[in-house]
Amino acid sequence: MTEAKTILVTGGAGFIGSAVIRHLIADTDASVVNLDMLTYAANLETLASVSGSERYSFERVDIRDATEVARVFSQHQPDAVMHLAAESHVDRSIDGPDDFIQTNIVGTYVLLEAARAYREGLTGGARDAFRFHHISTDEVFGSLGDEGMFTEETRYDPRSPYSASKAASDHLVRAWGETYGLPVVLSNCSNNYGPYHFPEKLIPLMIIKGLAGEALPVYGTGENVRDWLYVEDHARALWLVCSRGQVGESYNIGGKNEVQNVEVVRRLCQHLDQMTPRVDGKPREDQISFVTDRPGHDFRYAIDASKAERELGWTPLETFESGLEKTVRWYLDNEDWWRPILDGKYAGQRLGVGG
Ligand code: NAD
Ligand code: DAU
């Protein structure tokens, strides 16, 4: 695809999808159609900086609704799909896998069928240039020990309902490429963090609980390792994968920032203590509390992103230090974004203890 003009972004009201849309509107000349059903995880406020653009439109549609999805393709005539809509939270998938199976697997199937039918109606250059970019996770590769990294060749070994549903969707996407010739491209990324992150996830939850003087619940021993990537670096990578990636290929995206969970929480405490000290002057590290582990908790993720760096010329701009500091500052400055979430959709309670 040399000149993508209209990009259909699914899940654009979520954390990463909204970063992709802000990037597309600010830094490219593409038009964007945001298709999102607005689950608990969505927030249209997150798109306030771009929603006034003539190049932005919004469709409140469930990706499982084949009729409505087909209408969106027909009405907007996209040049590419960037598919991010998903149930994304591992702990919620432990408490209730059904939405994960329905949205991540069935929804992806519905979208693939709609894209296939739509593309069959295109001719010439538009047909060749069409892309279906599936955005996935490193969790499909399972859990690493102390050594090694995930490459594009790593065997799939998902271990949670969430990662199994994402693995299934990856397989469907590859199958539609092989069997029907749909021009697909995939990417698998490590843990994102940054502004507009829903406060069920580790980093925003710890910032908000840290500010409130509440216990900071670290699962198990806190030695589990995640490989953190600033969300805007991911958004840039995704556009490169969509616009320059080779058909049928997948690209691992990650920030080379492996950190143990307890160390992430300690660093957040230090930033908070520096920016807004506790009234009693005590360090927020005192709030850390080791709690019952997540069932099936993957020990370590680490991404080898050398293929994306080599073939797409992508490189992350933020270090973990600079990104974390920006993120803490953003949550301090944007309480009007996250406070309504705590007052309505999610109050910070423990999720994913099984059952
Ligand atoms: P998110 O939970 O913040 O947002 C998901 C969005 O999808 C929401 O706006 C929601 O309303 C929408 N959605 C959910 N079900 C839908 C449906 N049936 N129809 C239409 N819209 C629906 O998720 P995120 O963290 O932004 O993740 C986006 C994608 O990136 C997901 O596919 C996820 O698996 C993948 N991913 C996430 C991370 C991460 O660290 N967050 C890392 C790698 C990959
Ligand atoms: O690796 C990519 C994945 O990263 C994405 O595919 C998922 O969509 C995204 O949610 C994220 O999954 P994780 O399970 O790694 O993210 P989470 O923020 O839930 O947890 C990060 C780590 O912190 C994990 O090891 C569990 C731990 N944790 C989490 C929470 C919410 C805690 O110790 N305490 C907590 O309260």
Image (cartoon, rainbow, N blue to C red):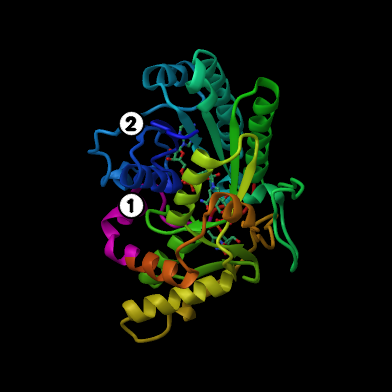
Question: What segment is highlighted magenta in the picture?
Answer: 330-350
Residue at the (50%, 76%) spot, across then down = 266
Tag 1: residue type?
Asp
Q: Which mark is residue 343?
A: 1
Contact (Cβ within 8 Å) of mark 2 with mark 1: no
User: Where does the image place residue 204, in percent across and percent down from the top left?
Assistant: 43, 61
Residue at screen point 37% across, 67% down:
326
**Magenta region's main secondary structure?**
helix
Residue 58 image label: 2
Distance from disc 2 to disc 1, alpha carbons, whole Å, reads 26 Å
> Residue 108: horizontal and vertical position, in percent?
57, 30
Residue in front for this viewpoint, 189 or 348: 189
Q: Can you say whether 28 is above or below 207 in the image?
A: above
Q: Position of residue 185 (x, y in %)?
A: 59, 37
Q: Earlier in the sequence, mark 2 or mark 1?
A: 2
Q: Residues within 10 Å of mark 1 (few under 14, many from 20)?
A: few
Q: Is residue 278 above or below residue 70?
A: below
What residue do we see at 71% from left, 46% from top? 158
Q: Amino acid at mark 2?
A: Phe
Residue located 53% across and 54% down the image: 313
Q: Which mark is residue 253?
A: none
Give the secondary structure at mark 2: strand
* The quarter of the displayed image where residue 52 is located: top left
Where residue 53 sits in the image (x, y, percent)? 24, 38
Judge whether residue 325 is colored magenta: no
Which sits in the foreground, 29 or 265? Answer: 29
Residue 87 visible, this angle? no
Discs 2/1, front:
2
The residue sitting at the left extreme is: 52
Q: Secondary structure at mark 1?
A: helix
